[in-house]
Image: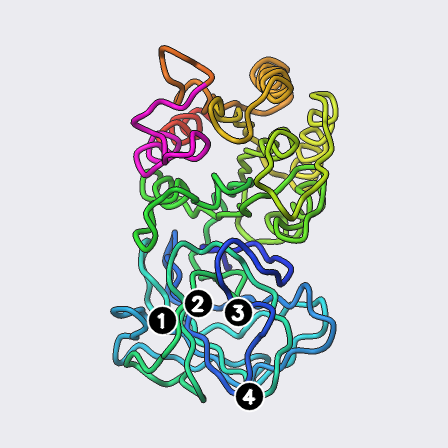
């Protein structure tokens, strides 16, 4: 019985927030990606996504290993992967594949090195823009390499969308949201997103289904498919999930206030009742899949580029509905947990990454603690 213990929500190849390789893709190159698992097991398998591919993608070889330093892999832990018994595989356009499982003892918090070799041109690659940790590229087939034989670095993930183990758990928690869930503002390379902290606090598998810039009600070239459409793929399709935490809507409210979002103009001006309808749709889908659903209030955003008179009105109205409607199974009031006591519309300075919108490491710890407390009541 397999449980998903790590995820990255797929995105359309794009320029993204930082330089990446999604549009150029890969040819005669290996890609090693380091991911931190929220639960362990004795057997592991990976899920590869070609959700935005327009022709078949060939994977010539793949392997997993315990991660070493940098791009290294621990000697003696490398395991070649197969797909339906074959070393090579083809992912159909807009499809995905799951590898066969291999034996590899892993614990919660361990880092796994996943290496993919592409011997033919991939074309633009489905990816996840903001990994906040390094991935590595090198020439030729490096799926068996234990040393750091890689000559290029990125902070995105490519093709890899999930890792599953035979943990047999049915208590995984999925966090569904935007850049705050994705971990923007946390220290890169340290795994201090609130999903990482929540897994450590609760001992439960935690899946991060955040996408930077994501919107509840509208698609975007950079910011992923709208939340009401991607929930099924990014959460409900993963084995072992029993609880969903929703923190989404801030960009739907704030993009119409800012001049700093070049890929999403003009942004629609939305009212609270439209966002409430979107939240109800997420609740409907999740409950239809048998999940419990926790609603999280939007964080304070005064002073940020998302703030303005309309944003203030709509964010207050949406948060009051989340708190008081009774439509969620439970509520975690992140707004109050992170607010400045002297100005409740602003992030407390000790929790502010610096843009008055995203938490820092300390703020993410507070968020994880608040969710952990609510989980204990369910």
The span from disc 1 to disc 3 (Cα, nearest Å) is 30 Å
Image quadrant in which you'd find residue 113: bottom left
Mark 4 vs mark 3: which is more N-terminal?
3
Measuring from the top left, give residue 111's x and y in whole percent.
Answer: 33, 62
SS for dot 3 = loop
Measuring from the top left, give residue 287's x and y in whole percent.
Answer: 66, 35
Circle 4 is placed at which residue position? 119
- Count of labels in the image: 4
- Residue sitting at 62 percent across and 52 percent down? 222
- Few, some or many C-alpha atoms within 10 Å of disc 4 (few <14, some 14-19, many ≥20)? some
Is the residue under label 1 in contact with that under label 2 (CB below 8 Å)? yes
Check the image and report above or below for 280 versus 318. Answer: below
Pick the front one: 135 or 62: 135
- Looking at the rendered image, the disc whose residue lies closer to the viewer, 4 or 3, is 3
- Looking at the rendered image, the disc whose residue lies closer to the viewer, 1 or 3, is 3
The magenta stretch is 346-368
Mark 1 vs mark 4: which is more N-terminal?
1
Pick the front one: 292 or 50: 50
- Looking at the rendered image, the disc whose residue lies closer to the viewer, 1 or 4, is 4
- Residue sitting at 62 percent across and 79 percent down? 122
What numbered label is drawn on residue 129? none
């Amino acid at each position: 019985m397999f449980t998903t213990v790590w995820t990255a929500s797929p995105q359309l190849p794009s320029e993204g927030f930082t330089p990446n390789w999604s549009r150029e893709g890969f040819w005669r190159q290996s890609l090693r990606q380091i991911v931190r698992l929220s639960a362990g097991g004795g057997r592991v398998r990976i899920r590869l996504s070609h959700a935005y591919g327009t022709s078949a993608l060939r994977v010539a070889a793949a392997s997993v290993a315990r991660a070493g330093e940098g791009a290294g892999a621990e000697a003696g832990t490398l395991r070649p992967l197969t797909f339906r018994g074959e070393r090579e595989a083809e992912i159909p356009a807009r499809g995905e594949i799951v590898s066969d499982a291999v034996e590899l003892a892993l614990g919660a918090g361990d880092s796994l090195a996943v290496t993919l070799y592409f011997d033919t041109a991939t074309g633009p690659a489905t990816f996840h823009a903001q990994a906040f940790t390094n991935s590595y590229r090198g020439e030729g087939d490096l799926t068996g390499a234990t040393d750091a034989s890689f000559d290029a670095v990125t902070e995105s993930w490519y093709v890899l969308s999930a890792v599953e183990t035979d943990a047999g758990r049915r208590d995984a928690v999925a966090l569904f949201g935007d850049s705050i869930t994705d971990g923007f503002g946390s220290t890169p390379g340290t795994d201090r997103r609130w999903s990482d902290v929540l897994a450590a606090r609760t001992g439960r598998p935690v899946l991060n289904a955040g996408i930077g810039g994501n919107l509840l009600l509208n698609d975007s070239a950079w910011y992923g498919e709208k939340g009401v459409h991607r929930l099924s793929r990014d959460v409900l399709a993963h084995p072992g999930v029993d609880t969903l935490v929703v923190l989404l809507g801030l960009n739907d409210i704030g993009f119409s206030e800012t001049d700093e979002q070049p890929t999403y103009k003009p942004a629609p001006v939305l009212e609270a009742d439209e966002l409430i309808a979107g939240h109800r749709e997420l609740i409907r889908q999740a409950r239809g899949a048998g999940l419990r659903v926790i609603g999280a209030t939007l964080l304070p955003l005064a002073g940020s580029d998302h703030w303005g008179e309309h944003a203030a009105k709509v964010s207050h109205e949406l948060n009051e509905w989340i708190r008081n409607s009774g439509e969620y199974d439970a509520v975690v009031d992140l707004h109050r947990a992170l607010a400045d006591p002297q100005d409740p519309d602003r992030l407390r300075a000790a929790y502010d990454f610096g843009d008055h919108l995203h938490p820092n490491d300390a703020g993410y710890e507070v968020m994880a603690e608040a969710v952990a407390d609510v989980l204990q009541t369910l």
